[in-house]
Image: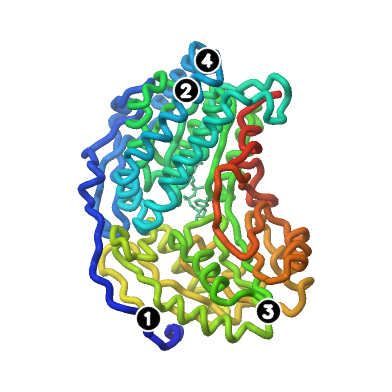
Amino acid sequence: MGEELATSHLGALAYDPAPESAAIARLHESYGIFVDGAFTDPAQHAQLLTLNPATGSGLAHVAMGSASDVDLAVASARRAFDTTWSRMRGAERAKYLFRIARLIQERARELAVVETLDNGKPIRESRDIDVPLAAAHFFYYAGWADKLEHAGFGAHPRPLGVAGQIIPWNFPLLMAAWKLAPALAAGNTCVLKPAETTPLSALVLAEILQQAELPPGVVNIVTGDGTTGAALVEHAGVDKIAFTGSTEVGRVIQRRANAAGKRVSLELGGKGANIVFEDAPIDEMIEGIVDGIFFNQGHVCCAGSRLLVQENVADEVLRRLLRRVDQLRVGDPLDKNTDVGAINSAEQLAKITELVETGEAEGATRHTSSCALPSEGFWFAPTVFSQVSSTQRIAREEIFGPVLSVLTFRTPDEAVAKANDTTYGLACGVWSEKGSRTLWVAERLRAGVVWANTYNRFDPASPFGGVKESGFGREGGRHGLEAYLDE
Ligand code: NAP
Ligand code: MG
């Protein structure tokens, strides 16, 4: 075992429990697929049980969508595209998007609880980040629906048709919003496939689409596993595939979709570098590092999972960082004081555990928070590795968990070289008081997003996406429309 995180429990004041009520979620026992504006039984009556990862107990049964269910959903989307949605004026489509945004706000508390139960993320994050940002995406793209000819993609941009959209489990509702809002604003219709372990918030969103009286078939939601996603990719009636998830699956999807002549956009993994120079403002920077890797248990594609620190301040940064990490509150995700929640699944926990073991075996120094972990469910204590070298697996592979690898550098050139020494290219952070240095470094980083003196900031007006094995295509902003328009 590695050594325990530093020392001081100063500041770790006792908090009374402040749990949000699970009853607010109002979950049903089971859910069908959402096709043609209604919930219906799947063709084969097969179901999946989605779990609460904080306890390991079952939350609800959802349909295990088959190829025939995907077929029904695509047919419904095609009908809606041909008969209503693509013919509607942009200003009319905007009204529906505004309505969806407002209904997400109205049902925000319920959505936050559903998301936290199904995913394991702290309620503070689902309440303050996931749900408000999901609403903000619909508001933002509602504003574009009647201005597409001014978006810079030709004078008469046209929708692509039926979009097949496959999303992961780390930000279930937010990723649904990132996919649906621009596609709908541009006049496409959609078939959405949520992740196997987190289908519930998308099903509440389906209820919201009904409340908004979105015309039937404009959005269809088929729950299931990877085979359901594959059926969507293979379907001849789908014009475009938008995927967020692992690089491995993304590669397969790109091949299959390209061969079938479909348009594709991919948001894949990352191994983001958070680069700290000697003159960085230390208190803000420590919070930024912690937020960069422990936000959402590190289940974040753009996580700042590699910390690159200038050598002359490395000891002090590590000391302060370890003290801060030891104070993170890990536990009941529904408790409003919780900082770090549960790992989303047993599979993900096994993957994190395996990679952390390689870190120890390859000689890095492990520091693990002394926090107590719940006895039920899937948990991993916040962990920092120091003495990491660029060749170790924990410096190269996406761990997708609450694990930070700390490396050092001497010069700005070396910082840039180390940051770019990865197959990925999604996001980086630069911490320095000198604007000129930050810009010099940012220009040389091979990453889709570079944050300066902050990390993990998201805004619907700002494009997000990767280079190299992190994928291609942008979501958010004016750029996000391009993935759903033909000039
Ligand atoms: P994944 O397997 O790529 O899953 C992403 C989505 O694709 C899910 O909806 C998944 O369904 C579906 N899918 C799986 N196989 C498919 C196939 N052959 N064809 C079409 N769709 C398919 O990712 P994961 O298993 O959730 O996570 C594995 C790793 O991916 C993580 O450890 C992490 O490194 C990375 N990841 C990255 C992001 C990101 O935001 N970039 C998000 C999540 C995960 P099921 O859920 O039903 O399998
Ligand atoms: Mg679940």
Q: CA distance from mark 1 to mark 3?
A: 26 Å
Residue at 66% across / 66% down in the picture?
A: 430
Kindly identify which numbered label has been placed on residue 132: none
Residue at 55% across / 16% down in the picture?
A: 89
**Closer to the camera, 184 or 62?**
184
Q: In this image, 43 relative to 285: left or right?
A: left
- As drawn, which residue projects farthest toward the top? 83
Kindly identify which numbered label has been placed on residue 88: 4
Amino acid type, mark 3 = Glu
Kindly identify which numbered label has been placed on residue 74: 2
Question: Quarter of the image containing the N terminus?
Answer: bottom left
Amino acid type, mark 4 = Met
Q: In this image, 65 relative to 322: left or right?
A: left
Kindly identify which numbered label has been placed on residue 278: 3
Q: Earlier in the sequence, mark 2 or mark 3?
A: 2
Amino acid type, mark 2 = Val
Q: In this image, 422 relative to 201: left or right?
A: right
Q: Earlier in the sequence, mark 4 or mark 3?
A: 4
Q: Position of residue 392 (x, y in %)?
A: 62, 73
Q: CA distance from mark 1 to mark 2?
A: 55 Å
